[in-house]
Image (cartoon, helix red, strand yellow):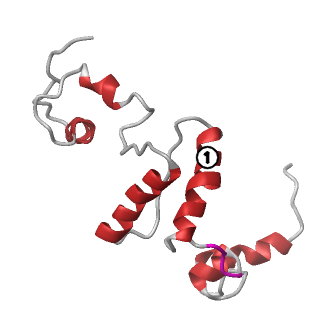
Amino acid sequence: MTSSPLPGGHKGRGIESSVQRVTDGKRGVTVRHLPEQMQLGGRYTTIVGNPMQVADALQSWVDEADIDGFNLTRTVTPESYEDFIDLVIPELQSRGIYKTAYAQGTLREKLFGEGARLGPRHTGAGFRDLADAPATQAP
């Protein structure tokens, strides 16, 4: 492993944005820093602690940034998801920042408000008649 700086001065914007993401804009990041940053499986913020500590961190994001959800990435599957569901979600629910029940209806009903089927103005509704047509066989 080397302590040499990450290469810089690339002309391509894709490389520059990738380096920016990996270094979080910090100067002096070396190749040695990369495995340290990725040691738990990703470059995303890592929260480690007991259920109350994890809930505290998530609640601070809700309170400070007014976010309305979280994207979870796994460290160990399926155990990390199971632990989150069994231990952290009840703590978030007891604080009133995570739902305890789902609203009735399908996702389509919740998103479009036009029933369980696509509304007539939706592009996909034009294919509805094709589903009822007899199948054709290739020659």
Pick whichever, 108 or 73, lies toward us.
73
Pick whichever, 57 or 2, lies toward us.
57
Task: Report the residue at 40% width, 28% height from top.
Answer: 39
Q: Is residue 7 above or below residue 48?
A: above
What type of secondary structure mainly makes up the magenta span? loop
Is 101 contained in the magenta span?
Answer: yes
- Give the quadrant of residue 11: top left
- Give the x, y percent position of residue 115: 70, 86
Q: Which residues are magenta?
A: 100-104
Q: Is residue 91 above or below residue 9?
A: below
- Give the x, y percent position of residue 40: 44, 32
**Mark 1 is on which residue type?**
Asp
Task: Report the residue at 70% width, 76% height from top.
Answer: 106
Query: Pointer 1: what residue?
Result: 83
- Give the quadrant of residue 121: bottom right
Q: Is residue 108 above or below residue 82?
A: below
